[in-house]
Image (cartoon, rainbow, N blue to C red):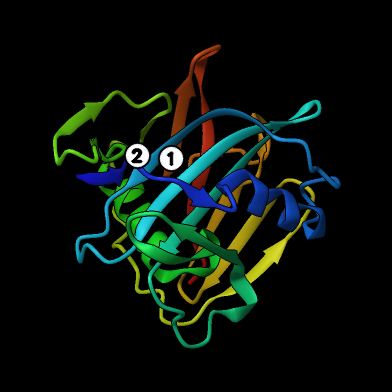
């Protein structure tokens, strides 16, 4: 269960992304972003927020997983998108999910166990919690013999359409440009749909390398 506080963020999420995206080969200098939707995974430890944005940037549709942390973890500075002030939770450090082991574990677990996006509760200022229907629906593979890997150390390789996370015995390939950033090619995949996109789109795949 992902709990989202009814709060203000300064700067906003899209402001942070707009400042970071031009450095990415798959973003084609995108700065003007339009929301398409988002989905969440759950951190079992309850420490890290995991949200993936689907945004429109000009004629491109981009897929951007991020994590939100209360503290800066050691060794992740290369993946820092920026910081924001949350009116309830205070300073939040925002990271590229592809460089965060918590996101990668949640993604791999969802893909390899046939999971779905986390249900979302909006926690209002009054303390009342209200469920929110997701606008991006995702689903993992129905059958796989690959175990969920550990992501102690990873290497990121980026191209014009995807990010490959090299993690020893497996690669996790995250589509960045939709709908054709990654081909499942009989590999365990995360697929998604959203309003206006009824046919499932491949969002990520997992591939054994050893």
Q: Are marks 2 and 1 in contact (CB under 8 Å)?
A: yes
- Image location of residue 149, percent across then percent down: 35, 69
User: In terms of depth relative to the viewer, which is nearer, 131 or 157?
Assistant: 131
Q: How far apart are marks 2 and 1 (CA)?
A: 5 Å
Q: In this view, does 12 lie above or below 70?
A: above
User: In terms of depth relative to the viewer, which is nearer, 150 or 23?
Assistant: 23
For the point 49% across and 14% down, which residue is it?
195
Whichever of callouts 2 and 1 sits on the residue coming sooner in the sequence is: 2
- Image location of residue 29, percent across then percent down: 85, 47
Q: Is residue 209 above or below residue 59?
A: below
- Residue matched to label 1: 190
Q: Residues within 10 Å of mark 2 (few under 14, many from 20)?
A: many
For residue 31, which quarter of the picture? top right
In this rendering, the count of numbered labels is 2
Q: Is residue 185 above or below residue 19?
A: above
For the point 81% across and 29% down, which residue is it?
58
For the point 74% across and 55% down, which residue is it?
19
Residue most toward the bottom?
A: 74
Residue most toward the left?
A: 128
Q: In this view, does 88 lie above or below 209?
A: above
For residue 23, which quarter of the picture? bottom right
For the point 66% across and 48% down, which residue is it?
15
Q: Is mark 2 on a helix, strand or loop?
A: loop
Q: Can residue 144 be seen in this view?
A: no
Q: Is mark 1 on a helix, strand or loop?
A: strand
- Image location of residue 108, percent across then percent down: 37, 56
- Residue matched to label 2: 140
Q: Can residue 116 be seen in this view?
A: yes
């Amino acid at each position: 269960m992902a709990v989202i506080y009814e709060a203000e963020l300064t700067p906003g999420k899209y402001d942070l992304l707009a400042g970071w995206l031009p450095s990415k080969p798959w973003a084609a200098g995108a700065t003007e972003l339009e929301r398409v939707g988002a989905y969440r995974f759950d951190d079992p430890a309850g420490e890290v927020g995991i949200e993936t944005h689907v945004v429109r940037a000009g004629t491109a549709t981009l897929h951007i997983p991020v994590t939100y942390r209360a503290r800066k973890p050691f060794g992740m500075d290369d993946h820092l998108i920026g910081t924001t002030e949350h009116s309830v939770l205070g300073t939040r450090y925002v990271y590229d999910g592809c460089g965060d082991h918590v996101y990668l574990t949640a993604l791999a677990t969802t893909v390899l166990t046939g999971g779905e996006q986390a249900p979302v509760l909006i926690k209002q200022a009054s303390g009342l919690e209200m469920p929110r229907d997701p606008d991006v629906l995702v689903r993992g593979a129905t059958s796989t013999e690959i175990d969920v890997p550990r992501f102690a150390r990873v290497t990121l390789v980026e191209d014009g359409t995807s990010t490959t996370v090299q993690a020893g015995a497996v690669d996790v390939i995250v589509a960045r440009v939709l709908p054709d950033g990654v081909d499942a090619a009989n590999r365990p995949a995360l697929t998604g749909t959203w309003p206006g996109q009824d046919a499932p789109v491949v969002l990520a795949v997992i591939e054994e390398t050893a």
